[in-house]
Image (spheres, rainbow, N blue to C red):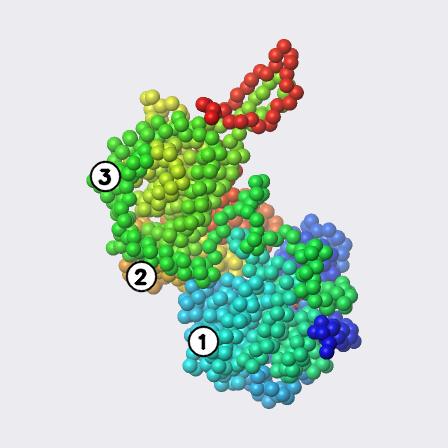
Amino acid sequence: MKSLQSEIEQRGRQIFELVDNHPESLFTKAGFYQRLMALSMRDEQLKLQLFRFVDVLPSLGSSSEIVEHLQEYLAHANGSQKISELLGAGVRLARIVPWISGPVLRWNVSEMARQFIAGRNPNDVMRTLRKRRSQKIGFTVDLLGEAVVSESETDKYAARYLDLLESLAHETKDWTDPLGKNSELFPVVNLSVKISALYSQINPADPADAIAHLAPKLRPLLRRARELGAFINFDMESYAHKNTTLELFKTIFAEEEFRDWPHAGIVTQAYLRDSEADLRNLIEWGRARGTRFAVRLVKGAYWDYETSKSRQNGWDCPVFLQKPASDANFETLTRLLLENESIVTAAFGSHNVRSIAHAQAFAEELGIDRSRFEFQLLYGMAGPIKRALVEMGYRVREYCPVGELLPGMSYLVRRLLENTSNEGFLRAKFSENVPVEDLLRDPCEILRRSKNGVLPPSNPTINMTTTTPKTHPGAPYENAPLTNFALPENQEKMRTALREQRKQFGRKVPLTINGEKIWTDNMFSSVNPSQPDQIVGYAAEAGIPEAERAIAVARAAFEKWRRTSFEQRCQLLERVAEILERRRFELCALEVFEVGKPWAQADGDIAEAIDFCTFYARQMRRMGRPRLTQNVPGEESYQHYWPRGVALVIAPWNFPMAILCGMVSAALVTGNTVIMKPSEQSVIIGAMLMEIYEEAGVPPGVLNFLNGKGSVIGAHMVDHKDVDLIAFTGSREVGLWIWETAGKTREGQRELKRVICEMGGKNAMIVDSDADLDEAIVDSIYSAFGFQGQKCSALSRLIVLEENYNRVIERLLGAAASVRVGNPEEPSVVVGPVIDEAAYRRILDYLEVGKSEATLAYQAKDVPPHGYFIPPTIFTGVTPDMRIAREEIFGPVLSVIKVRDLDEAIDVANGTDYALTGGFFSRSPANIERVKAQLEAGNVYINRPCTGAIVGRHPFGGFKMSGSGTKAGGEDYLLNFLVPRVVTENVARHGMAPEKTPEYRDEFLWPKK
Ligand SMILES: Cc1cc2nc3c(=O)[nH]c(=O)nc-3n(C[C@H](O)[C@H](O)[C@H](O)COP(=O)(O)OP(=O)(O)OC[C@H]3O[C@@H](n4cnc5c(N)ncnc54)[C@H](O)[C@@H]3O)c2cc1C
């Protein structure tokens, strides 16, 4: 008996022979597409620019716009001669005759797209399907579309799916199965569906919510498909949607109505590490259900996205990092599917001859007839392989995307990337002529050789596995990963934490002065803004005597703390980080109740607090040792830093842990002693931070916890002669008062007070005429309404160029109407309550102002009747002089301002008192450069939301009336808490001097240990 490997090789060779009879036209040397491919494969940078140009092209209106973009994208590219050839008209020529070059380019790109898109509409696609029928190739049709951002868009999508189904069934009613055998397993009409097109608010943390919305949209489609004898396949998208897609599939096809329907399928992505477990589970489910179903096995289309997303978030990467690992897993899953052929019909979605030949050989080994499974390949790709498979008597189905060019762009770019990928089979075979024996090699064998060091790992830059070694000194700073709420275990931990926190409602927290717990006669309550009758906790309230005492003990503790080595202070922060991590879910749950933060926002707040601790510890180690200023013989001059003294930290409620912890940690690690005053609205979270610092071992008096009214104890301490530094984040009104008051020197005061002052914003984002609206709309909504618009970075002015205005408004209003408002205990809620009654009333007043000044374009209707819920609101017709365009509202209210051009947009964006965050959506490299240079904001964000700064990556803080120009989470932040000092010593004796002076020396500590 032949071994499986030799059987695979024999079949592989046979396929290649058949393929070579009909060479692949896509990889020949003629034509626009072929030249684009050839250029892209030669130069990665050029590939990026060319594909970006392809991406923006359909949304450009005029020829001159097309030519301008082309010039901008290729301004610095190498090989301009080649590029000129490629484009059929030189870049210089294009400038002179844009009316010729623009349409030529558009035509070329449209033609290229047509190679991958089977038709513009259901009628159009039939031409292709008929042709394929004559070649004995079946079809599955997929609807291309823009990313849906609203429920009205999903309704349209669902209607288009139904239309498509009807039309396909009608047009193919007399078609028969190409193999004429086992045809009952393979209906002629086959529709591929993406769940993200049917619900715009899928939140990976809440599969139940997604299923509740998706199932009603799917049922009519499934019902009709069943009546028409068609097949429905659920495509698989990014990892974040994987569990929801699987759950949805299992839920809906277990329902009475669909339980015995065999014509449903789902995709398994072999590049996922957990795909084998998922497939086993699916097969078990199928057996329990008792009806056949289908699985399309693919490697997966989102490899680059998954790797970069997980790197950004610090998550374990869900995909294999070596290409042969995906190939090997594809084979494992192929075997699993074929071994369970009695319940599952397999479709192998691959263009890789090795993967295909393996499936064929294994099926043969098991004695499974060729007509009982199928090969699926993409429209416009690997034509000769399809033909070869048909000739060999296999069942072949083509995946045919249908849609217009603009919505089809992301699909086209994915195909271009796939065809030019260094790792891809098609490039290896058809472009690089890799020998057949290499192409047919066993992937397990390749992996073994790679492990033994014979082959290098394919992606040495990426190392995201769980076994990643801990960071070593000098390694790049790593942020605390965000919690991945797509994982069911994290959802469960959060739900448990919420239950546990509920039990703690009504807890009481004392003041902490010099390590003593102090209860006062006055207690004030902190309530749940979603349900104000629920008291989250009570906190003892400090008056002037307690404030005086706290200052005195902090002053007394300072002498010792300042002489504690910076290393000990750094370790204290690192212990705090560990405790925060350990108590992460508990603290997140507390934030949901005390300040109304949605899950992911609460988690982001705790992650940021952890980051502040680890980042400032790291910075202090960098700055802690005295450093030589210049190397001169005979003299040693060392600069180092002293702490300032007693720091008063006054924090807001909107980032109740992160900002408080950030300011406190910066002050402590630099050797100051601290009085921390949390916001009255988030006092219980503040008390938790005190508790954590105590557990971490902060000495008595070094950190003191004082809760009380800002207007009483806050004002008293700001003005106090023994307070040396005030770190404040909050409103402009209070900030300016602190700035002014701290400027007055009181009798007996030792130091000029330092004020670190971070205030509000009136943040703007500009939408350019060529912006990618799929992104611009989603990111604007998130920036404006996430956490109820209560971030100082939140978007409040959307400035839209008139060319794009109508389209932006239409999609924006639809998207706003789809956002979920409610109690943030539910994971899919995006907009919860505002913080308290005062904020609620103030924002309602602003809504009245807005109605009198501008046009109320959208206001949510369904908000919970109790609790401080403000309906997300959008005003249009806003002009820059209106109050709603100038004053900080701090709520879910967005003003849209229409402008003529980018000049006016920048003027409007900069025409405010504030300069905190700002954003720009554009695909014009020149305009992006301009905005980078001119937008007045401490944090400028391009093509992404304007909120969500990450410690170390986006040092955060603004200027003008937004703040004193400091950057929390930045390299120079700690300097604000320190005074620099230089110690110079003449070390020469009678001309005799040491030859070398070290760059760093030990700290100046007294007394020395
Ligand atoms: C009919 C059909 C339907 C499809 N439907 C879906 C779908 O619903 N969802 C989906 O996600 N995909 C889907 N795909 C798969 C996807 O679009 C690609 O076509 C497919 O992954 C390419 O694999 P291949 O076997 O043809 O080529 P190969 O060249 O053998 O494999 C390329 C694939 O290997 C993987 N890979 C690349 N580099 C690495 C690396 N360094 N480490 C590990 N793995 C790597 C990637 O998945 C990449 O796509 C479908 C494909 C077909 C043919």
**Which residue is at the front of the view, 135 or 814?**
135
The residues tagged by marks 1 and 3 sit, at their Cα atoms, a distance apart of 58 Å
Residue at horizontal 62%, vertical 73%?
334
Mark 2 falls on what kind of element? loop
Q: Is residue 66 above or below residue 914?
A: below
Whether residue 511 sits left or right of residue 937 in the image: it is: left
Q: Dividing the image into four equal quarters, which quarter contains ligand 1?
A: bottom right
Q: Which mark identifies residue 520?
A: 3
The residues tagged by marks 3 and 2 sit, at their Cα atoms, a distance apart of 36 Å
10 Å crowding of disc 2: few (<14), some (14-19), many (20+): some
Q: Quadrant of residue 533?
A: bottom left
**Residue under numbered circle 1:** 252
Residue that sits furthest to the top in the current view? 990
**Residue under numbered circle 2:** 864
**Which residue is at the front of the view, 468 or 677?**
468
Residue 457 lies, in percent from the top left, at: 67, 55
Whether residue 755 sits left or right of residue 304 in the image: it is: left
Residue 647 lies, in percent from the top left, at: 38, 32
